[in-house]
Image: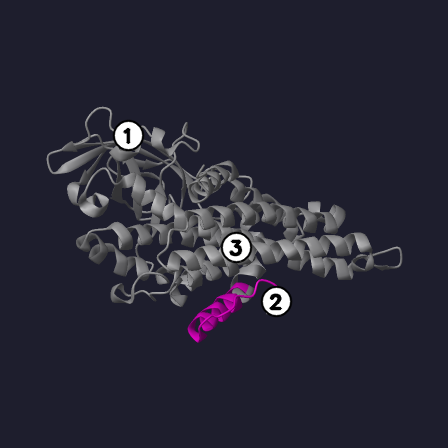
């Protein structure tokens, strides 16, 4: 176990879970991650192993067949998995956010129908807010759900679905003006629809097409896709929570948890980059001694380790705040912002320590160098995080003059 990124006051069960996940990462993920990533190959065997460990049901309540663990436990597991290969943590995260939305906001029938099968990994989740021309402005979505008898008809195009091809249940945010008069705030006329589909690409059910995988710079292996709805008919009982107009709030609740997850991913990738950097620095020699003995490299290692430690502490604090039932958007935004920025910097320093070999695909740091940028934009860009942080600080420190 590393000296860095330790977490105080864990239960024996939490420590046992984390030890099991770390062993799995070292044994099943790290030896194959770079090869699979270079081939952009979906990690089927790894995913099956995660199912056997019960990680797809980690935070799903025990009454639905899950482990009923806390967000902290989940975030620490994600940190370990991202240390092995960030794409695998993405496969679990999107699934978990849909399970979380169902647990927090679903009707009893929706929870009974989906959560037991999600805990077993039989139903795999994905969710979608973004659209091709949307960027960070979620309130500007144009996808629509229109009531037609006992069904809704969905039309529109969604973008950046992690697990878009492999998932069988997608939570889709659409505009639904039913019951919301003209002039209603845009975020009050959005609804989350639960869309069941077959895995794969092409027309996966009538009115629903998953065109194919988006070719990305990094974050490979996991399938990232578009989603096109053209007359897609959804029964009314698949409105999340049974009431229209609550979709924006539901999705923001899920994203708040997702930001803790992205912070955990940043922590995991940064830890791996530090491990690679400190190991290489002790093996590589210049001017007659290991480069770790040069002060310039020691300064880099000191800065990297400090950033790993700081990001981990903020991520743990944000997770514990959410677990306590308190509002944590400020802490989650800070953790996501800091961890993703520090991850990029730690990875770059490890890349620099490797010198020319960091540019070679034979070395793992090359993969991390392409993966880290995704964390700067996933679950809200750094600029969005700073907006959230700034607004919340002004609420907390309102001038009383």
Marks 1/3: CA distance?
A: 34 Å
Callout 2: few (<14), some (14-19), or many (20+) C-alpha neighbours within 10 Å? Answer: few
Image: 292 above or below 12: above
Dots 3, 2 in contact, CB < 8 A: no
Marks 3/2: CA distance?
A: 18 Å
Q: Is residue 262 left or right of residue 111?
A: right
From the image, tell me which residue sits under label 1.
185
- Furthest-bottom residue in this view: 12
**Nearer-N-terminus badge (3/2):** 2
Residue 42 appears in the rendering: no
Mark 3, secondary structure of its residue: helix
**Nearer-N-terminus badge (1/3):** 1
Callout 3: few (<14), some (14-19), or many (20+) C-alpha neighbours within 10 Å? Answer: many
Task: Check residue 314 in the rendering and tell me which mark sits there, or answer none.
Answer: 3
- Residue visible at 21% across and 47% down in the picture: 241
Give the magenta-colored segment's residue range: 2-25
Mark 2, secondary structure of its residue: loop
From the image, tell me which residue sits under label 2.
2
Dots 2, 1 in contact, CB < 8 A: no
Task: Check residue 18 in the rendering and tell me which mark sits there, or answer none.
Answer: none
Image: 285 above or below 185: below
- Residue visible at 59% across and 49% down in the picture: 343
Callout 1: few (<14), some (14-19), or many (20+) C-alpha neighbours within 10 Å? Answer: few
């Amino acid at each position: 176990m590393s000296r860095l990124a330790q977490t105080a006051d864990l239960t024996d069960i939490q420590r046992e879970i984390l030890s099991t996940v770390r062993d799995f990462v070292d044994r099943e993920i790290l030896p194959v991650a770079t090869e699979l990533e270079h081939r952009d190959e979906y990690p089927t065997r790894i995913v099956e192993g995660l199912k056997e460990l019960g990680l797809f049901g980690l935070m799903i309540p025990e009454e639905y067949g899950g482990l009923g663990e806390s967000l902290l436990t989940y975030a620490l597991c994600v940190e370990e998995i991202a240390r092995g290969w960030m794409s695998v943590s993405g496969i679990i995260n999107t699934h978990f956010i849909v399970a979380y939305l169902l647990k927090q906001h679903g009707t009893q029938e929706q929870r009974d129908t989906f959560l037991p099968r999600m805990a077993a990994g039989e139903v795999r989740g994905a969710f979608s807010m973004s659209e091709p021309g949307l960027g960070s402005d979620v309130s500007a979505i144009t996808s629509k759900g229109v009531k037609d008898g006992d069904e809704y008809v969905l039309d529109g195009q969604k973008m950046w679905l992690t697990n878009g091809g492999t998932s069988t249940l997608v939570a889709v945010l659409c505009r639904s003006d039913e019951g919301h008069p003209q002039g209603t705030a845009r975020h009050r006329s959005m609804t989350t629809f639960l869309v069941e589909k077959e895995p794969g690409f092409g027309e996966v059910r009538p009115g629903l097409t998953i065109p194919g995988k988006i070719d990305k710079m990094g974050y490979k292996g996991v399938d990232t896709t578009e989603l096109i709805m053209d007359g897609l008919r959804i029964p009314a009982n698949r409105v999340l929570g049974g009431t229209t107009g609550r979709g924006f709030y539901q999705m923001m609740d899920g994203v708040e948890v997702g930001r803790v997850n992205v912070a955990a991913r940043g922590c995991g990738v940064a830890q791996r980059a530090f491990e690679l950097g400190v190991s290489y620095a002790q093996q590589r020699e210049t001017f007659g001694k290991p480069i770790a003995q040069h002060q310039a490299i020691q300064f880099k290692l000191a800065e990297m380790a400090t950033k790993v430690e700081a990001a981990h502490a903020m991520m743990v604090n944000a997770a514990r705040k959410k677990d306590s039932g308190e509002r944590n958007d400020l802490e989650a935004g800070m953790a996501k912002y800091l961890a993703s920025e520090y991850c990029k910097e730690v990875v770059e320093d490890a890349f620099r320590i490797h010198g020319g070999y960091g540019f070679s695909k034979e070395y793992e740091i090359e993969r991390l160098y392409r993966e880290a940028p995704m964390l700067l934009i996933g679950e809200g860009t750094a600029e969005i995080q700073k907006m959230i942080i700034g607004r919340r600080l002004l609420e907390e420190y309102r001038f009383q003059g």
